[in-house]
Every structure is written in C-alpha cells, then in structure tokens.
Image (cartoon, rainbow, N blue to C red):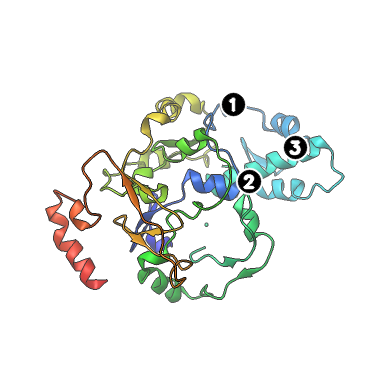
Amino acid sequence: MVERWRPETHTFHLPVGECTITLEDVYYILGLNVSGFPVSGSNFVNIKEICHDYLGVISPQGATKGNSIKLKWLKDTFDDVGENASVLEKQASCRAYILRMIGGLLMSDKSNNRYRLSCVAPESSNPWIFPLAQRFNSGGLNFGKVPHNDIEGYRKTIDHMMVDEFYWRPYLMFQHEVSEEEMVTWTACTYLHCFHIVEKHHTDRVTLQFGFHQQIPQPPEDMRAYHEVDMRHEVDDNWNWVWKEEIQHWNERHNYVLQSKIVEESGLFYNLFGTQCTTPETAGSGSNPPTTNVQDNDQDEPENLNSFKGLNEFDEILDVELEVI
C-alpha cells in the first residue's frame, strides 16, 4: 500500500480508482464523533498540571518532553484499569486512550512515539458491532487469503484488482443510527486539525466512497508548508491563531460538502465509472441484484463511458483500459 500512496493527495491510487481513510471510516471503525470543534489551542501549558487535572497522576521524569507526552507511558499506566476501578480512573483511562488514538494513529507525526492501517484485510466471522474495530479484536480472523511476508503477493493482488473486488461503501448495510451532522461532516472537503498538524480531507477525489459518481477532481492543494511544521524543535504557539483561516474553513464545512450525482445502491460494488457490479454475495446466488438509480436534474443518460462528455483527451486512454479488461 505504501507504493500506492500519494502524499500530494493523501490517497491510495488503485487500478479501480483513488481511495483514502475518511472521517466516515474514523467514525465507524473507532467509534469517535468527528463533528464539532477542531482539536486546537495554545501550547502554553504546564504539562504536569494537565496530567494531574485530566489523568489524575503527575507524569514522572522522562514521560514528557516539552508539551508532549510519551504514548508508551500512557499505555503502560492506563491500559488496564480493572473492573473495580473508580469513575475517575475509568475517565482517565478513556482520555489516555483517546490521546493514543489521535497521536499514534489518526494524527501521527515525525516526533514518532509522542502525542501528536493492512493491505488485504482478514475475514471476520464476528457480527457487525459498533465500533467496528471490536470485530477484529476478539479473535476468529481468517487470514487464508492474506499473503504472509510476501511483498510480491501483495503487489500482484493490488495490481490485478478487479472492479468487483473493492468495497466502495462497506458500511452501507450496517444498521447503526447516525446523526445528520455526522454524515454531513463525512463528505466535507475541508481541513483537519490537531494543534500544529493540518491535513486536507480530500473527499472530492474519493466521491465513490460516499455513493457519488467520481468526476475529475481539481489539482490538489500544495500542503508542503503545513507538513514542514512539527514539534521536534519544541515549538510553542497558539495554533488557534496560526491556523485561523483553516479553522474558519472547518467551522464553515457545511459549505464544502460533496454535491454530485447520487448513486443509490444496496449491497453492490461500483467501479471507477459508477457502473454496477455484483458482489461475492449476490454473484451466483440465483437472484437478480437491485437496480441502480441515479438522481439528477439533468436529462437521463446511459451510464457508460460516453457520459464523460468533453473529455476527448481521455478517450484513447479509456479505450486502452477497456481492451486490457
């Protein structure tokens, strides 16, 4: 997957199109709400006082550096609270876990192990539960189709991926009540914040992941200036002021949600052009899959390559791709 990752867009480039980790994935997999205020503020704090107030302990020597805290110390100290833990101890454990999730997974940076995903996923027989990470945390995983220590195997699997082998919308049939505010935030093409870290949520490049037809996106924004900011030199600043324009963009995220043709689907795959493909569950099941409807105010047009009008410069490329398929 590293070979398929493009840092300019923060997306994976696959034979079937671009995809990435979205706020929808964060919500369903980790169970974290993604709407609300940005994670930002001032670095002018006393780290030991913060640890005492929110974690209930004073961090020992070596557990902190500047205004950062070691993830390993958080794990060793708060990972096992026990059944008889008090309410305050459970709250501290939850806060430490959230810090580890943000600093070690969602917003990791070059400071490595201080606070700041598999190529082919195994099959799980466990029921769909929320958050979904619990499905892969209780055993029973089948790695039969996952190459082990085989880079060539992974590479060939991805290089020869067919359109019916990629789930664009894996949560579509999952029964879980979600607020409208959360769903709107998932599709917003805006900035994500974690104090000094700023990244772009490029939903316009992965519209198929939200049930929209994929159009040719605009050139990506140059994020190099953002990526050059890190905490290795113990920079202290008020990030609400430094990133005030980006934070304002997030606060106005409802103005930047996806607006495109909607593909109504029911347990189906959709390829790069939004055309319908059967899933392994419906293929060979003897039943006809549901039909696909496209909602749009324009006159109905056939769902094929000809719907990409005005893109003559891509005709030759598309013809070559069809011959290969």
Answer with the quarter of the image where residue 219 lies. Answer: top left
Q: Between disc 3 and disc 1, whose residue precedes?
A: 1
Q: Which mark is residue 91?
A: 3
One can see residue 9 in this view = no
Please tell me whether residue 231 is drawn above or below residue 282 in the rendered image.
Answer: above
Mark closer to the observer (2, 3): 3
Residue 261 at what x, y percent from top left?
A: 31, 44
Instruction: Judge the density around disc 1: few (<14), some (14-19), many (≥20) Cα neighbours within 10 Å.
Output: few
Q: Furthest-front residue in view? A: 287
Residue 25 at what x, y percent from top left?
A: 51, 49
- Inspect the image, locate mark 2, and give the three-letter code of the amino acid beneath it: Arg
One can see residue 47 in this view = yes
- 324 and 152: which is toward the camera: 324
The residue that mark 2 highlights is 100
The residue that mark 1 highlights is 44
Answer with the quarter of the image where residue 17 lies. Answer: bottom left
Residue 285 at what x, y percent from top left?
A: 47, 71
